[in-house]
Every structure is written in structure tokens, then in C-alpha cells.
Amino acid sequence: MSTNMTRWKFWRIDAAGAAVCLALSLALYLGAIRPLIRNHDDFVDQKAQLDEQRTRLDEMNLTLKAYRGQYETAQRELAQGALRLESTSNVNRRLADISALAVSCNLKINEIQPGRAVPTPHYQTVPIHLAGNGTYRTCTAFLHKLRKSFPDTSISLLELAGNPSDPSGMGTFRLDLQWHASPELSTATR
């Protein structure tokens, strides 16, 4: 009975010690271990975000490198094949060249007339009206050669009209061309 009594006598002390150990363990967990776990979880999340951002940065660097290569290639091609615009003072020569091209394509020119130059910041546009007769085939051949021979000239209007009763296939055409010429130099830069 005495050992039973001894055990019974100290149960309060054992319970108090267990309570103190439990309180200290809880305080240690809440004060030190739990914040460490949170910090570790935050660290893992931030590391994953950093890895993702590094991957995106690497992809963007590769894309930038590819775009730089394309830009340099375009710059080289532009420098090699740069279109040199002529001065509007050469308008009579331009009209003669277009007329000669049309005649070489078997077109009959009835009218060729330049308009007033329209200035823009980087070039001038000179409208050229062209009218005459030819077949569909000769007109398309002319347009093809015009594009190759005069890359600075665009077509703003194309009208072809034929006569179904004409066995020769001759028709009329009307073209409005836009010749892009060099900008007029201001008096300050002359």
C-alpha cells in the first residue's frame, strides 16, 4: 500500500510537470517551429516563382536574340536593296520611260499627263494619268513590267473596258499611277 500511496501522492506533481512540458512544447511549436515551417513554405513558393521568372527571362532573351537577328537581316537587306527615289525635276524623263514601256508592250497611248506633286514628310507623290488602247494581255504585260521597271510607282486606279463585238480583242484602259519621288529640299538645306 505504501507504493500505491507514493504514486498517488505525486500524481499532482506529475500532472503539473506534464502540463508544464505540454505548455513549453506548445510555446516552442507556436513561437519557433511554426514560424520556421511558414518561412520554409514561403521560401519554397518564392524559389518556385524565381525559377519560373528565370525560365521566362531565358525565353525572352532567346526571343530578343531572334528578333535582333531578324532586325539586323532586315537592315542589311534594306541597305542592299534600298529604293532610291528620283527628283520630281525628272518628270519628263519618267513620262517618256513609261510611254516607251507601254509601246514596247504593244499599247497605244492616247493620253499621258502628270499631276501636281503632293508633298509628305518623307517623299512626294506625283499622280500620272495614262489612257490608251490595248488587249487584256498587253495591258497585263505592261502592268507586270511597270512594277519591275518602276518599283517607286504604284497604281491607284485601273480601268479596262472591252468591246465583245471587236474580234481583235482591243479595248481601252485608264490608269492612275502614283510616282513616289524624293522630297523637295527646303531652301535652308540647299
Image: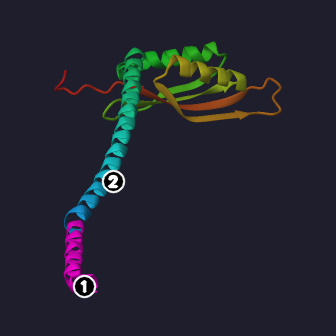
In the rendered image, which residue does mark 1 sit on? Answer: 2
Point out the image quarter for the C terminus. top left
**Left or right, residue 139 beside residue 96:** right
Q: Main secondary structure of the magenta part?
A: helix
149 falls in the magenta region: no
Residue 50 placement (x, y as % from top left): 31, 46
In the figure, 137 relative to 122: above or below? above
In the rendered image, which residue does mark 2 sit on? Answer: 45
| Magenta-tinted stretch | 1-29
Tell me what residue is drawn at x 20 percent, y 66 percent. 28
Residue 186 placement (x, y as % from top left): 22, 28
Closer to the camera in the image, 113 or 36: 36
Residue 3 placement (x, y as % from top left): 26, 81
Kind of residue sitting beneath label 1 = Ser
Residue 19 figure quarter:
bottom left
Residue 88 figure quarter:
top left
Tell me what residue is drawn at x 38 percent, y 40 percent. 55
Closer to the camera in the image, 85 or 168: 85
**Left or right, residue 85 beside residue 137:** left
The label on residue 127 is: none
Kind of residue sitting beneath label 2 = Asp
